[in-house]
Image (tube, rainbow, N blue to C red):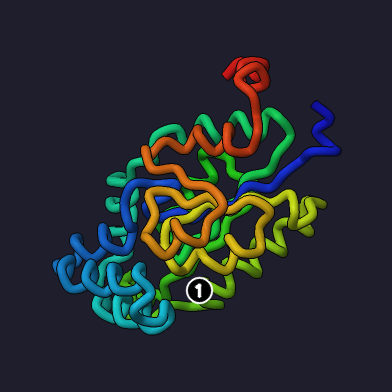
């Protein structure tokens, strides 16, 4: 395969896509506000409330949580089946992998760096004296920002939008999926299933490889 000719960028959502959980729900449970936050998350995922509004509501409930709690939460994260092998195989075949998340860099950043994804972007908590302040800092990674990140990462690695792949599960992923050459719904909400060009419903991210047209022979050639 001529990797320069066919190089692609694969951009994935993080929560309930690259990993099995919703990170903010894990943090909320640690803060004792799990039920309230999970209800807001679910409404946002169904597209019933604006992501910006839902994020502000959820983060406000986390005010005064000690920063060290975020490290404990990181230990609770489970990757989705096939996630790490998918990344390694894609990179071995000359592709790039990015994560764009409405979750929190403070929790997922170290994990993604360890795995070795090429690019990632997520929200950040504002902190003061070792505690969360109840608001975010920096640009908000919402539905539009996810699409903008896909465009930016594609330009950075010299991949045309037609050769990008976007994988997600919620309404927040719809704009980046619409921009991509191949959109894949992953264990997704009905609105996302309807909008995507392809779907994975068995929870195995290695199926991304086959939906991209990568053959078993090419996968085997990586030795992974």
Q: Quadrant of residue 38?
A: bottom left
Q: Nearer the viewer, residue 43 or 156?
A: 43
- Residue drawn at the location 74% of the way across and 49% of the way down: 163
- Residue drawn at the location 80% of the way across and 33% of the way down: 3
Determine if residue 103 is in view.
Answer: no
Q: Is residue 26 above or below residue 175?
A: above
Q: Quadrant of residue 150?
A: bottom right
Determine if residue 68 is in view.
Answer: yes
- Residue drawn at the location 24% of the way across and 78% of the way down: 61
Tag count:
1
Q: Is residue 80 above or below residue 190?
A: above
Q: Mark 1 sits on what residue?
A: 142
Q: Position of residue 26 (x, y in %)?
A: 26, 57
On the rendered image, what quadrant is the C terminus found in?
Answer: top right
- In the image: residue 23, left or right of residue 215: left
- In the image: residue 183, left or right of residue 200: right
Q: Is residue 17 above or below residue 34?
A: above
Q: Position of residue 202 (x, y in %)?
A: 37, 38
Q: Position of residue 131 (x, y in %)?
A: 31, 72
Q: Which secondary structure lies at badge 1?
A: loop
On the rendered image, what quadrant is the N terminus found in?
Answer: top right
Q: Nearer the viewer, residue 116 or 198?
A: 198
What is the crowding at mark 1: few (fewer than 14 residues within 10 Å), some, or many (at least 20)?
A: many
């Amino acid at each position: 395969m001529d990797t320069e000719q066919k190089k692609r960028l694969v951009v994935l959502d993080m929560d309930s896509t690259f990993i099995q959980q919703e990170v903010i729900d894990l943090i909320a449970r640690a803060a004792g506000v799990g039920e309230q936050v999970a209800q807001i998350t679910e409404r946002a995922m169904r597209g019933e409330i604006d992501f910006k509004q839902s994020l502000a509501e959820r983060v406000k409930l986390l005010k005064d949580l000690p920063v060290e709690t975020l490290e404990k939460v990181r230990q609770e994260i489970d990757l989705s089946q096939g996630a790490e092998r998918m990344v390694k195989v894609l990179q071995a075949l000359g592709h790039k992998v990015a994560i764009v998340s409405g979750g929190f860099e403070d929790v997922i950043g170290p994990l993604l760096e360890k795995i070795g994804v090429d690019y990632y972007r997520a929200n950040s908590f504002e902190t003061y004296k070792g505690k969360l302040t109840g608001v975010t800092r920096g640009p908000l990674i919402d539905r539009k920002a996810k699409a903008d990140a896909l465009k930016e990462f594609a330009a950075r690695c010299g991949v045309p939008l037609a050769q990008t792949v976007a994988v997600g599960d919620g309404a927040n992923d719809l704009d980046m999926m619409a921009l991509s050459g191949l959109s894949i719904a992953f264990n997704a909400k009905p609105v996302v299933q309807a909008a995507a060009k392809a779907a994975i419903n068995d929870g195995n991210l290695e199926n991304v490889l086959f939906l991209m047209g990568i053959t078993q022979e090419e996968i085997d050639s990586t030795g992974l």
